[in-house]
Amino acid sequence: MKHLLIAAGLLTATSAMAAEKPQLTVYTYDSFVSDWGPGPKAEEAFEAVCNCDLKLVGVEDGAALLSRIRLEGENSEADIVLGLDTNLIETAKKTGLFTPHAVEADYTLPIEWADDTFVPYDWGYFAFVHKAGVDAPSSFRELADSDRKILIQDPRSSTPGLGLLLWIKSAYGDEANDIWADLSDNIVTVTKGWSEAYGLFLDGEADMVLSYTTSPAYHLIAEEDDSKTTATFDEGHYMQIEVAAKLAGTNQSELADQFLNFMVSDAFQTIIPTTNWMYPSVTPVGGLPEGFNSLKVPAKALFFSPEEAVSARSEALPEWLEALSQ
Amino acid sequence: MARSTQPVSTVPGLAAACVVAALILGTLAAVAFRAEAGHGFLFADWAALRFTLTQAILSSIISVVLAVPVARALSRRRFAGRRVLIALLGAPFILPVIVAILGLLQVFGRSGWISELLAQFGAPPIRIYGMHGVVLAHVFFNLPLATRLILQGWQEVPSERFRLAAQLGCEGRSLFRLIELPMLARIVPGVAAVIFAICLTSFAVALTLGGGPRATTVELAIYQAFTYDFDLGRAALLSGLQLVLTAAAAFTALKLSREGGFGAGLDRTIHRWDGGAPIVDAIWIILAAVFLLLPLSAVVMSGLEGLFTMPPVVFKAALISVAVAAASTAILLMLALPMAATIAVRRHGLVELSGILGLAASPLVIGTGLFIIIRPVADPTSLALPVTALVNATMALPFALRILVPAAQDTVLRHGRLALSLNMKGRVFFTRILIPRMRAQIGFAAGLSAALSMGDLGVIALFADPEFATLPLQIYRLMGAYKMQAAAGGALLLLVLSMTVFWILDRGGRWHVED
């Protein structure tokens, strides 16, 4: 009995000690927290400097993440949301759940970044991945006129899918629906998410798959396989910028600020390229890992501001549905 | 209080049905009440509804129509590997959707095995994408299940009926009319309704095999309403629509299915004297086996290499999945056994209905609803595994009832009156007569439920705790991290584990010695 009491006392003591450390809760998408994502390494690096407990919570993908935050509303457990992209920023801002940051950094983004609420942590260009050594089209027009087969994702359920929708809209404006109509016989199928499309591409189901210019870096670095490359399009390539922000309802405001600053520091940014397979938003002092330098870099970056992205989506989605439902 | 004239009480079954109905309708209500002003039903939803209904009706009819001759052939032939084939019938069903899609397209895709074979003869690749592709995929998932359920019907015909038929020289068409057709009339409508409900909530399969937005299903619209639009009212409305459609299908099935069994038998090993045409049976069995085994072997072949590149966390996830499956199976039996007993003594609309709704309920709605309900009282993330087990049990319930109800009805019919005259009622009847006599069906139902739970991503993605990922979730994560080969290895591990669990439970309950 006495032993039990002592044991119980010890247990309470240790849990009390653990409780003394403040906890910072970060909601993010599932692939961030997976064992192969940036999560575990980022957690270790931040906990080494913050004297806190970093709790990462994974929620499917960026869009589902924003829904979760809206579902939880003002009394969300989250202090930080990490993993929205620029296409979701406008909707996120309108919820009034996020609060401005005080982060200053020398971003190495192809565009100027001035948002007062959202802090970018990585970015990439959408692109079609194909086998190296095969001629690839150099524009959507050329692709549509060719008999190349492509795999794409559904803009209603997938971030890259939405990216492609906005890519074509930003490049072609009012003619976007013509491009889609001409592309329809090139599209093998439309998948729910990125994984299905990429998996089918690796199985040889199509010539090209919608992904990122940074995708070949995975094959180069992790598999020492240089057989994948991306097609560079003359119209330019649409960018995805992934961001994080502090919630207004946080009770760990200082810690949250510390995290956002940490996120644009070298300690975090060096983790990004080989775990998230994207470009870091601030190139680390040591530069990018070997393999990233051989990637194709588009001559022109296409980008909708968060406000434009929302109206472009609502215009382009019905066009897409109509063109591909013929 | 009037003395009950039934050997088992209907109260526990009614209570279980209420739990299930509360879970499904309560979560739906929770989502609806949380909704802000939204769009309601959109014009585009009509197109989605039409497509969803068409493919679900086609898929369920074709699955059942093809399953009857296959099950008939399997019921009257004995051959080496028959048991393995029957066990493998459970396999397509338990694969995570994404794995099944990749497996199917490795066989039927543009660059799949069949297209490559055609290319040898200079023929163009087959065009799989479209309505026929959607139906093909759904038949791949459901034909084996339908076969297995209908085969169960054949096995439950008392051996004496076949013996008598043989003595009277009753063969072929007349045997079919007198024995097999009544059995089919009792089993088939329910099986068709279950498959209809499964196909109604299809999303990734329909979209990918359908080739594009023409193949938009209601479930996709629900997903979109939840994520990009955050229109909970619309999500709840569409999900309610799925429930109504399923309820309609279930009622139609009940109306169509004929009551009554074959009376008592002496539980002798089933022997068949009717020959039929061995060639025809062989053709059916071979066709079904090839259709089933080709995509499965694609999954196995791509998994073999990956098995050795799998990181250790995958094995941890496998253990977690086994634990969730065990819990889910226990919950399932606690719900399904009393419900089956209740239906056996008196058909009861609420019980029958809540027994099938689990399939039609959108996992997203159940998950989100539970999240809304749990959050004020506890941290949903810390309850991820129990919640997953509960939801998986609800989804497996319709199958379990299809398996258990006919046997429970027979048992009550055969032994009910004698038991009552001996004053064996309630718990005594339940534990001493009903349960032992349903061992085989309980084993099959438990095996199917465990395997289903192992393979289903379920609601875990909504609640995910990084520390406690299940095997399907880890497979998705590996894919998301470009590690397709390791993911294929994980899928093979999942397939083997699920089949093992299924085999153990199914064999464990079986007392028929068939051959």
Image (cartoon, helix red, strand yellow):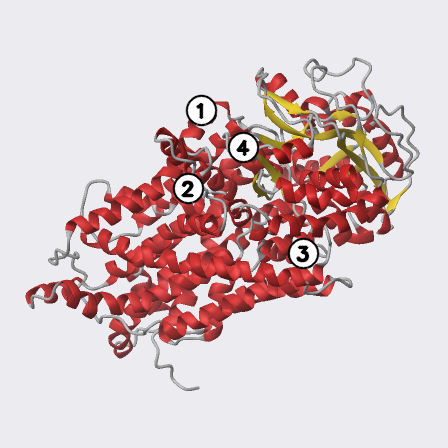
Q: For the residue marked with disc 1, what is the amino acid?
A: Glu
- Tell me if mark 3 has few (under 14), some (14-19) or many (20+) residues whose alpha carbon lies within 10 angstroms of its own: some
Q: Residue at x 89, y 26 (%)?
A: A105
Q: For the residue marked with disc 3, what is the amino acid?
A: Ile
- Please name which of the two marks, 2 or 4, marks the residue nearer to the observer: 4
Local secondary structure at mark 4: loop
Q: Chain of mark 4?
A: A
Image marks 1 and 4: residues in contact by CB distance under 8 Å? no
Q: Look at the image and tell me whether residue A325 can be seen.
A: yes
Q: Chain of mark 3?
A: B
- Spatial distance from mark 2 to mark 4, Cα to Cα? 32 Å
Q: Is residue B41 left or right of residue B498?
A: right
**Which residue in the protein does label 1 denote?**
B305
> Which one is earlier in the sequence, the residue at label 1 or at label 2?
1
> Which one is earlier in the sequence, the residue at label 2 or at label 3?
3
Local secondary structure at mark 3: helix
The x, y position of residue B60, in whole percent, is 42, 59
**Which residue in the protein does label 4 denote?**
A206
**Which residue in the protein does label 2 denote?**
B498
Q: Chain of mark 1?
A: B
- Tell me if mark 1 has few (under 14), some (14-19) or many (20+) residues whose alpha carbon lies within 10 angstroms of its own: some
Q: Residue at x 34, y 68 (%)?
A: B428
**Count of numbered tags:** 4
Judge whether B185 appears above or below B217 on screen: below
| Residues flagged by tags 2 and 3 on a common chain | yes
The one nearer the camera, B146 or B51, is B51
| Residues flagged by tags 2 and 4 on a common chain | no
**Which residue in the protein does label 3 denote?**
B374
Judge whether B332 appears above or below B478 on screen: below
Q: For the residue marked with disc 2, what is the amino acid?
A: Ser
Image marks 2 and 4: residues in contact by CB distance under 8 Å? no
